[in-house]
């Protein structure tokens, strides 16, 4: 069978046994190209087999998480029992495995996320007048000969305001 005939084949013609054989071949470490040639399939057919065998959707993710949590529970139970059986270096190593497995379990379950948010509010810095504004104020005080309102301050003028005395 050539590649052109393999393209014409529909997915219904691939028996479930063939799909399992392809999945087993991929899991055994053979490359996709080797499996493609061995089973005389196209890359699209192999991609569809992989997608059906190992789906990556929300249900599959939840299933994987639950399965992983179950396996971690088994490991934690076994190594916890072993760590309490004696009080030597091996028991300490088992206890370390238990602690790491518990940390991983909490990471997977989302229980190690931050439970408190630190809202530190920093005051906005006071704006220093720009050098342009400082020069403009000095020139205006020289032009008018007096500070604004007699309180010791110099009138502030925006760069696009040509005459500060007009209301």
Image: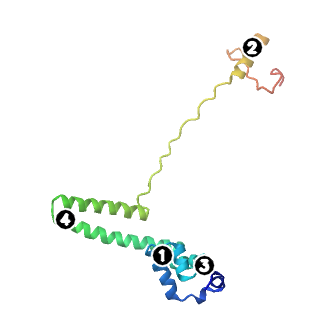
For image coordinates 50% across by 80% down, the residue present is 22
Q: CA distance from mark 4 to mark 3?
A: 55 Å
Alpha-carbon span between mark 1 and mark 4: 41 Å
Q: Earlier in the sequence, mark 4 or mark 3?
A: 3
Q: Nearer the viewer, mark 2 or mark 3?
A: 3
User: Who comes first in sequence, dot 4 or dot 2?
Assistant: 4
Of labels 1 and 4, the one closer to you: 1
- Image height of 161 relative to 48, above or below: above
Against 44, residue 153 (above or below) is above
Q: Which residue is mark 4?
A: 84
Residue 87 placement: quadrant: bottom left
Who comes first in sequence, dot 1 or dot 4? 1
Q: Which mark is residue 141?
A: 2
Q: Are marks 2 and 3 in contact (CB under 8 Å)?
A: no
Q: Earlier in the sequence, mark 3 or mark 1?
A: 1
Answer yes or no: do the residues labelled 4 and 2 have beta carbons within 8 Å? no
Left or right: 121 in relation to 99: right
In this picture, residue 98 sits left or right of residue 125: left
Depth check, front residue: 94 or 111: 94
Q: How many other residues sit within 10 Å of disc 4, few (<14), some (14-19) or many (≥20)?
A: few
| Image marks 1 and 4: residues in contact by CB distance under 8 Å | no
Counting the numbered discs, the total is 4
Q: Give the alpha-carbon distance from disc 4 to disc 2, as whole Å.
A: 85 Å
Seen at 52% across and 75% down, the residue is: 34
Residue 40 placement (x, y as % from top left) = 57, 82
Q: Secondary structure at mark 4?
A: helix
């Amino acid at each position: 069978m050539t590649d052109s005939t393999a393209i014409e084949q529909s997915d219904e013609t691939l028996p479930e046994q063939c799909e399992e054989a392809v999945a087993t071949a991929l899991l055994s470490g053979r490359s996709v190209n080797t499996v493609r040639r061995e089973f005389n399939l196209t890359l699209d057919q192999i991609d569809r087999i992989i997608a059906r065998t190992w789906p990556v959707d929300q249900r599959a993710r939840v299933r994987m998480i639950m399965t992983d949590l179950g396996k971690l529970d088994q490991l934690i139970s076994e190594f916890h029992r072993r760590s309490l059986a004696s009080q030597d270096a091996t028991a300490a190593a088992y206890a370390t495995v238990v602690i790491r497995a518990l940390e991983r379990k909490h990471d997977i379950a989302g229980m190690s996320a931050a439970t408190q948010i630190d809202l530190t509010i920093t005051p906005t810095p006071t704006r220093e007048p720009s050098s342009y504004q400082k020069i403009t104020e000095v020139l205006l005080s020289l032009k008018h000969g007096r500070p604004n309102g007699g309180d010791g301050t110099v009138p502030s003028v925006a760069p696009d305001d040509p005459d500060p005395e007009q209301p």
